[in-house]
Image (cartoon, helix red, strand yellow):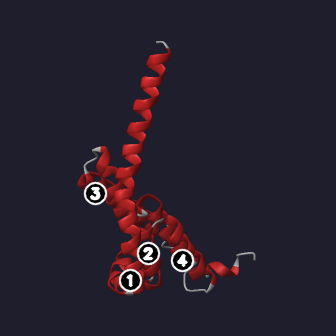
Amino acid sequence: MGWTGFVTALWEALTEAGTTVLAIAVIVIPLMVVVEFLKEWRVFDWLSARLTPGTGRLGLSGNAAFPLAAGAMLGLSYGSGLIIDSTREGRLTRRDAYVLTALLAPCHAIFEDTLVFVPLGVNPFLLLGIRAAGALALTVVLARVWQSSAPEPLNSSVRR
């Protein structure tokens, strides 16, 4: 492959990468705008109130509903920030923090990430189903394993 072949391959790689970045931006930027509106309209507060009964079935306290809703919708960094805040304020037990983290690790930003893979040809329903089922199964197993442990506030052992 000569100089012409290298330039051709480089041009194809750059145009394909640019097309992929644009396709992702078309999805992510509107999602970011929608998330800001959802936060302003307090949709996450409403959603966490609706999730509270489900958190009990997962072995979590009702206080875990808001970090769960935010982490599933907005991503792990935002959800983990809420988990840290909730534990520092004593609203989550050590067990809740661990089980919630185990749920959000495979299931964070589940809708946003799924939409990001659509332009690459991934079946969104299959990806969403596999991630959700795996995260829920892991959470239920961990909650049952840690069920016998006494709820201890996480902030009692956190160093500042």
| Within-10-Å neighbours for mark 2: few <14, some 14–19, many 20+ | many
Residue behind mark 4: 82
Of 73 and 29, which appears nearest the observer?
A: 29
Mark-to-mark CA distance, 3 and 4: 25 Å
Please identify the quarter of the rendering in which residue 128 is found.
bottom left
Q: Secondary structure at mark 2?
A: helix
Of 20 and 155, which appears nearest the observer?
A: 20
Mark-to-mark CA distance, 1 and 3: 21 Å
Q: Are marks 1 and 2 in contact (CB under 8 Å)?
A: yes
4 or 1: tag closer to the N-terminus: 1
The residue type indicated by label 1 comes to Ser
Residue behind mark 1: 48
Mark-to-mark CA distance, 4 and 1: 13 Å
Q: Are marks 4 and 2 in contact (CB under 8 Å)?
A: yes
Q: Secondary structure at mark 3?
A: helix
Residue behind mark 2: 70
